Amino acid sequence: MSSAGTLRTALAVLCAVMGPAATGGQEKPLERSFASGASSGFRIQLTVHTEVRGEETEKIGAKTYVKPFVHAAEAGLSWTASRRVISMDAAGLAEIEETLGSFEEFGADALAGDPDSAKLLAALREMLSGWKKDSVLRYREARNAQLSGLNAEGVPPLGEEKPVVLTLWLLRALRPVAALPTKPVRIGERWEEPRSANLPPWEGVKGLESGEWLEAGAGGQLAATLQVVQQIRGSAPRPGAGDASPQERAEATFFAESLADVSLLDGSLISATRSASREILWTPGPVEGLPDPPQFRAKLSATVTIRRLP
């Protein structure tokens, strides 16, 4: 199967995990309304951070000492996304054309004097630079602002180990759209529902999604802020270990949060701040001479900001 096909299949799984909650209340939820030929422009900024933390051991004489280490790097990319409604069907499903251009790199940084951090930065910049080219995306948007027809071209490659939960989240988070819950707009009323999914090689996966409509400070526009938090937990193979034995398995977590200012007139996005991270924590086992075994963490995270252009 091609990488795009694999991504589409995995995206379908993640959508099942983090899809909208069941309808609650009797008021009508906010829906998107479209006009054929309507266009809008957005400036999008993406920052990617990668980090590895751990403890090295060193034996001096009869004693074993622990020396913490950190390797980290960060790089960013910004661009303009121009959206146009190509067509609509009778059910209100809109065909969207999104044109990407005016790319700029920013914020490249790594821990000074650390060769491993420099390597992480070089890899990050290569991935972002390879995606930095003018392109046109086509996908569909429903009345609840759920998207379909997305493919791998819509997201920079992150080199993420399976399951590519951060990449899949980012594929949607980079689109200037806010998926609308089937909950009515009631300011300050919070909802929370469990989620479950099959995300191999993670096992025992459990998820939770919560959300809330908040008052928005959207420059006098008739708008509300939609806050959504998504969490996934499970166990995973130790990074680079393949199909690890039970004693080599690690704790896996995914956490995402989005704050989106949404127009109450047509459900369109005005601005958004989104962030997500996946983290693997593993403990190799006891080390002679140490009261506690050393721990290692590998974290990959992304931050997205979106603002509508005048």
Image (spheres, grey):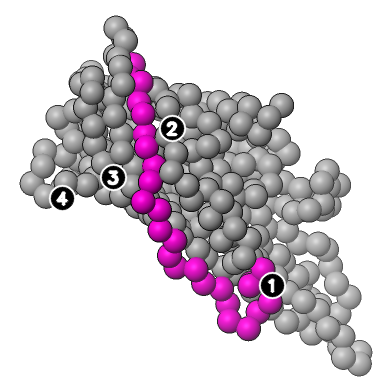
* Pointer 4 with pointer 2, Cβ within 8 A: no
Give the answer, above or below, for where 36 lies relative to 46. above
Q: How crowded is mark 1: few (under 14 residues within 10 Å), some or many (20 or more)?
A: some
Name the residue tied to disc 2. Answer: 137
The kind of residue on which mark 3 rests is Phe
Residue linked to disc 1: 116
What residue is shown at x 73% (from left), y 39% (from top)?
201
Q: Where are the magenta residues, as a range?
A: 93-119
| Callout 1 amino acid | Asp
Q: Which of marks 2 and 1 is in front?
A: 2
Q: Is disc 4 placed on a helix, strand or loop?
A: loop
Q: How far apart are marks 3 and 2 (CA)?
A: 15 Å
Q: Earlier in the sequence, mark 1 or mark 3?
A: 3
Residue at mark 1 to residue at mark 3: CA–CA distance: 36 Å
* Mark 2 element type: strand
Q: Is residue 291 left or right of residue 255?
A: right
The residues tagged by marks 4 and 3 sit, at their Cα atoms, a distance apart of 18 Å
Q: What residue type is labelled 2?
A: Leu
Residue 217's label in the rendered image is: 4
Q: Where is residue 239 in the image (x, y as percent from the top left)?
A: 74, 54
**What is the spatial separation of the Cα atoms under label 4 and label 1, in whole angstroms?**
43 Å
